[in-house]
Amino acid sequence: MKILIVDDSKAMRMIVMRALKSTSTYGDAEMLQAVDGKEALGMIEADPPDLVLSDWNMPEMSGIELLQTLGERGIIPPTFGFVTSEHTPEMYDRAMAAGAQFLVSKPFTPESLEGALAGAA
């Protein structure tokens, strides 16, 4: 399994990777990183991952803009979700309408992240 973690914070990308590696389901997955939606878009177009975990707010291209662009181009990763510090009902509705399978609020635990992913599968 190949997982793309998209966040403008290197520290947060490391936290997400550490959380995934501590799970029984995702511990052996190949982890890729992108610093924003624009970089992620290029990576996804070149070689789509199995799972994308994206922050919402980032420079260049936000997570929701990434998901919307993927949809417009007919490229939908099998699983796309948000790991973000903001979590409003409006954001949730917008994410789901664009094709996201889940939205996890920061801070999170490895168990809550794995639970969100299990619910999305």
Image (cartoon, rainbow, N blue to C red):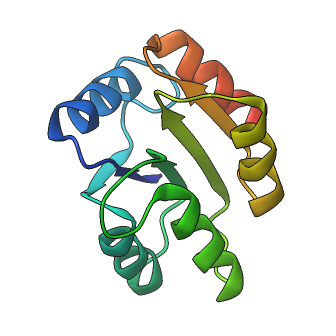
Say above or below: 81 vs 34: above
Decide which of 91, 46 is in the foreground and name it.
Answer: 91
Q: Name the residue at 32% across, 47% down.
A: 7
Give residue 11's position: percent from left, percent from top: 17, 31
The answer to whether residue 77 of the structure is visible from this angle is yes
Say above or below: 90 vs 113: below
Taking the image as shown, residue 117 lies to the left or right of residue 106, namely: right
Instruction: Tell me the quarter of the picture where residue 78 sits.
Output: bottom right
Q: Name the residue at 24% across, 57% down.
A: 35
Taking the image as shown, residue 110 lies to the left or right of residue 76, namely: left
Instruction: Tell me the quarter of the picture where residue 105 sits.
Output: top right
Decide which of 18, 36 is in the foreground and name it.
Answer: 36
The answer to whether residue 74 of the structure is visible from this angle is no
Give residue 17's position: percent from left, percent from top: 30, 33
Pick the quarter of the image with the C terminus. top right
Say above or below: 46 vs 63: below
Decide which of 38, 120 is in the foreground and name it.
Answer: 38
Give residue 94's position: percent from left, percent from top: 76, 51
Taking the image as shown, residue 33 lies to the left or right of residue 109, namely: left
Give residue 98's position: percent from left, percent from top: 75, 62
Q: What is the number of callouts on the image?
A: 0
